[in-house]
Image (cartoon, grey):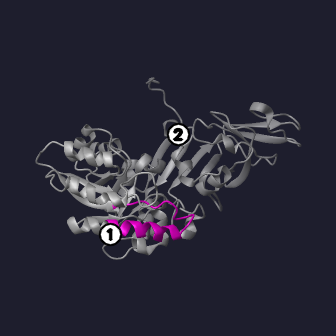
Amino acid sequence: MLAFGRMKTSPRSSVLIDLAAVRHNVAHLLSLLRPGCRMLVAVKADAYGHGILPVARAVVTAGAQGVAVATAEEAVALRDAGFLSGILVMGPLYSLDQYEEMIRQNVEFAVVSPEMASELRRLKASGTRARVHVKIDSGMNRQGIFPEEVGSFLDSIQDLAGIELTGVMTHFACVTEDPGSVGFQLGRFIPAVAEVQRRWPGVVVHAANSAATLSSPGSHLDMVRCGCAVYGLSPWQLDALSEGLIPALRWESQVVIVKRVAPGEGVGYGHTFRPVVETNVALVPIGYGDGVFRALSNRGEVLVNGRRYPVAGRISMDSFGVDVGTDGRVKVGDRVTLIGQDGDERITAEEIAHRLGTINYEVTCDIALDRSERLFLNE
């Protein structure tokens, strides 16, 4: 890795994470659950771009049982940083070393394939036990053991002193697209759960993601696993505020140059923007290298001092232009909001996702935090 010395730098953009909003969202989601139903919060992929350790601490403070991650590496990073609450690794483990490290770190993990189930028999006998959740594939057809394989899986671990089955889980594929699919998948899942509970009566049963937590109380079971909603991102790609959620992430930059452009002159690579009347173009010093999608060229909008302005020309790796007109309102140093609220106007991750034909948490995950500063508010 290159070393850039001790030069004092000014951030090209700032990603502001409001942990009070995260705690509010956890409390709101918990309020929808029946008494005794618990919550894990998905903090994989650096908490959807929001910061895994501060978010993990905030959600536990707000009442979550613990957190869920995708990889063993994410779990170890949390433990190394001093996070002591419960962790579940939902994705596959790839080596015996990872299994044993999870045991040493007191991290629970999901068994998501027959191959993983077979690997459990290779664990060395020790004074500690592997705490595992078996994942049932009830219709996602991606990870998990099919319901008809559950009996043989239970047979394979029944005599293993080093294995404790603590949970049984599934994952919904189409809650937002087809609400009826929740009942279909539960119809496959619940009989498999009953088979598990006959042999392991104390297992925790969980299935609901954010969308199911908000819309399908019958899917809450013993515990829910919420991801996007905790960050104030709408599972339906709509207005999160209308769903009782508060967006936690704001992304800001600044104007570094304002340049007068004559009618017909081109701006940026390919001259894809040519004003028909004289205008001013403000330069923002971040681009697709920072996570500003190039597909927003000539399509996106930003807020400058709380007013909307259109992107002018192609978004480059390190900068893009904004058509700010000739009224003189915009000056060098003015705040540019890419995601978030400024005054009465706001730009949401959902709005950007709609323009791109994607989902809101791809937008937050793709912010390049090695080129921005991230600040945590209300810790």
Q: Does residue 272 lie above or below 91 as drawn? A: above
The amino acid type of the residue labelled 2 equals Ala
Q: Earlier in the sequence, mark 1 or mark 2?
A: 1
In the image, residue 31 lies at what x, y percent? Answer: 41, 73
In the image, residue 359 lies at what x, y percent? Answer: 58, 53
Quarter in which the N terminus is drawn: top left
Mark 2 Cα shell of 10 Å, populated few (<14), some (14-19), many (≥20): some
Which of discs 1 and 2 lies nearer the camera? The answer is: 1
Left or right: 341 as drawn, with respect to 7: right
Residue 312 in view, yes or no? yes
Which of the 4 image quadrants contains residue 155? bottom left
Q: Magenta stretch?
A: 169-192
Camera-side residue of 99 and 75: 99
For disc 1, the marked residue is 222
The amino acid type of the residue labelled 1 equals Asp
Quarter in which the C terminus is drawn: bottom left
For disc 2, the marked residue is 368
Residue 280 among those drawn in magenta: no
Left or right: 144 as drawn, with respect to 306: left
Residue located 54% across and 43% down the image = 367
Residue located 66% across and 37% down the image = 256
Camera-side residue of 34 and 319: 34
